[in-house]
Amino acid sequence: MGQSLVKNYLHIVFSTKYRQELIHEPVEKELYAYLGSVCNTMECQPIKIGGYTDHIHILCMLSKKVALMNLVEKVKSHSSKWIKTMGEEYKNFYWQDGYGGFSVNPAEVDVVINYIAGQKEHHSKKSFQTEYRAFLKKYKVEYDEKYVWD
């Protein structure tokens, strides 16, 4: 085969350190745009970025040139540095150490887009921890509860 053809849709989820509720207007939309710009810089086309006060969802195309862990590392480190420039209330802003990365069936991309778009409504009924456990169950990811949240 003379050509590498790849199309990997990824749903990436991570939270603020200790799930602190730090993502609010007016910085929220700017943060999503900044996360998208980091994805673009790494040739990982962002499709939908959103979240809630304590976590982020990124739906993107993973570039064939980039490992998932490298993408997440860059997205988190660059955005953490950026948000600290947005005011005194963000000087101690950090992301959690880990993340969830889930492959998305191309037929379900619209479902994930709508899911990310509805985060505010969704989290009026369900906590981030409950949401994240549901993802782990859906994707049959084995985990130890004591290591997921620290």
Image: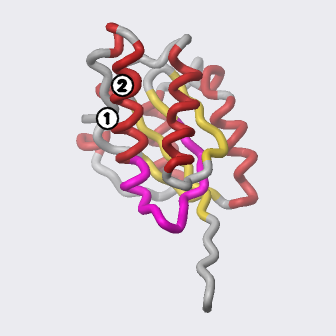
- The question of residue 10 being in magenta is answered with no
Indicate the secondary structure of the residue bearing disc 2: helix
The residue located at (35%, 47%) in the rendering is 73
Pointer 2 residue = 19
Query: Is mark 1 in CB contact (under 8 Å) with mark 2?
Result: yes
Measured from the top left, where is residue 45 in percent x and y?
61, 51
Front-lying residue, 64 or 136: 64
Within 10 Å of disc 2 (Cα), the crowding (few <14, some 14-19, many 20+) is some
Measured from the top left, where is residue 42 in percent x and y?
49, 52
Within 10 Å of disc 1 (Cα), the crowding (few <14, some 14-19, many 20+) is some
| Highlighted magenta segment, given as a residue range | 57-72
Residue 43 numbered mark, or none? none
The residue located at (72%, 37%) in the rendering is 114
Quarter of the figure with residue 47: top right
Question: The residue under label 1 is which amino acid type?
Answer: Gln
Residue 96 numbered mark, or none? 1
Indicate the secondary structure of the residue bearing disc 1: loop
**Quadrant, the C terminus:** top left
The residue located at (30%, 27%) in the rendering is 94
Question: How far is mark 1 from mark 2, CA to CA?
Answer: 8 Å
- The question of residue 61 being in magenta is answered with yes
- Residue 108 is left or right of residue 18, and the answer is right
Measured from the top left, where is residue 57 in percent x and y?
53, 38
